[in-house]
Image (spheres, coloured by chain):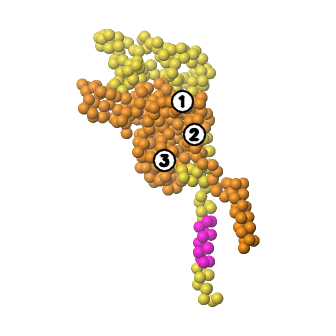
Amino acid sequence: MKHYNHIIRFVTILILVGIGFLLVRSFIVPDSFGVYGSYTYGYHRGDSDREQEAWPPLYKGEKRCGICHEAQASDIMSGAHKSVTCEACHGVFKAHNAETASLVKKDLSNAACLICHQQMAARPETFPQIVSLRVHMGEQDEAFEEQMTCGSCHIAHIPL
Amino acid sequence: MNQDRRKFIKTVFHSGLAITLFPSGVLASEGGTANLYAFIVDTEKCIGCGKCVDACKQENNVPDNCYRTWVERYRIMADGRVAVDSPYGGAKGFDPVSGDEKPVKAFFVPKLCNHCKDPNCVQVCPVGATYVSKDGFVLVDEKQCVACGYCIQACPYGARYLNPVTRVADKCTWCFHRVQKGLETACVSVCPMKARMFGKVDDPAGPVYKILKEKRLQILKPETGNNPMAFYIGLDKEVR
């Protein structure tokens, strides 16, 4: 029996190392690890789903804007811009009142229209687009372009 | 001999029962993953306004020079040359290219994470920080990620980046935080042409069900075997 002593010592050390590994592992690996999902692609910390779900959505949608801006919400649905949501042009929803209305983007420049309507080869042909204001209005002189904006003829919410 | 066999059968039966009754205890994991959602991009409708890119940046607080989604413009010349550009990811729109050379065909291709069924990026993650969620979203766990960058290299679509603020890998989440609350993704919600569609694969009333069944669709880089869940209508052979 005494000839086995060295084996017993070795096995004891091995077991201690094993226990030590499991102990350290139990502290390092988060509790929710591997609770959800498959082993192939879904092995992860389960709480991560909950944390990411909890992020607040910032884009609120047309209905939220329409609560106060009833007239504009119904205007836009009546014209060619009905598929354009409020936040597409006005930017992400920002809570505001009459005094802090400047928080919301209100860009009436030609550039704001041309971001969609500038003529470009890559745009679908059926989509309304103009080369420039002058060409659009039948080659007026340069002074004309300075005096006129898209808004001179079109209303942004009901363009046509 | 007979006694042993009875004992053996008993043990097998009991362990079988245990696995059936307490699967979470024995297998440690409940349920698999199912790819319940799909994204459809209609390149024939896209006008390249870049509202989607802008909305994504606002909604997800994406740092400058990083993009979770972006719009590429392809211009194919008469001699077969292909010019591709995507200034600011398309967030500020595109300039009309002046000059004599007119492309024979041109189109926009919005891109984003494909939320693949068999994602390379997940396979290479050494710490289990990136994963496919129960309903098929490919997500990054900020707290587990060690920013080794393997996933960024592994993604054949270039959909991932190293976030300079959080200092971990980051990517499109298909607006996981919105979809779980029943909202559409930010990019889909602002698209004026309805060129982007997102919804449940098996919801007949949803926006993608009919298109997935009836339309002719393509995926990007099928040869990589990632099985993307983002599908394209009207994709040209030149698109990479």
Same-chain status of marks 1 and 2:
yes
Three-letter code for the amino acid on which mark 2 is drawn: Leu
Residue ID at (44%, 12%): A154
- Residue shown at the point (42%, 27%) measured from the top left: B44
Dot 3: element: loop
- Res. A91 in view: no
Q: Is residue A150 magenta?
A: no
Whichever of callouts 2 and 3 sits on the residue coming sooner in the sequence is 2
Q: Is the C-beta separation of discs 2 and 3 under 8 Å? A: no
Q: Residue furthest bottom?
A: A2
Residue drawn where x is 42% and y is 46% of the image:
B224
Residue A20 highlighted magenta (yes or no): yes
Residue B118 placement (x, y as % from top left): 49, 47
The disc numbered 1 marks a residue on which chain? B
| Residue that mark 1 sits on | B210
Dot 3: chain letter: B
| Residue at disc 1, secondary structure | helix
Magenta stretch: give its range: A11-23
Judge by depth and name the residue closer to the eye, B3 or A124. B3
Judge if badges 2 and 3 mark residues of a common chain.
Answer: yes
Please name whichever residue, A104 or B42, is drawn nearer the observer in this view of the structure: B42
Spatial separation of the CA atoms under disc 1 and disc 2: 15 Å
Q: CA distance from mark 2 to mark 3?
A: 15 Å
Q: Nearer the viewer, residue B80 or A144?
A: B80
Amino acid type at circle 1 is Lys
According to the picture, the residue beneath numbered tag 3 turns out to be: B119
Q: Is residue A135 above or below residue B87?
A: above
- Let me know if residue A160 appears in the view: yes
Identify which residue is drawn at 43% across, 10% down. Answer: A153
Colour that chain B carries in the picture: orange
**Residue bearing mark 2:** B36
Q: Amino acid at mark 3?
A: Pro
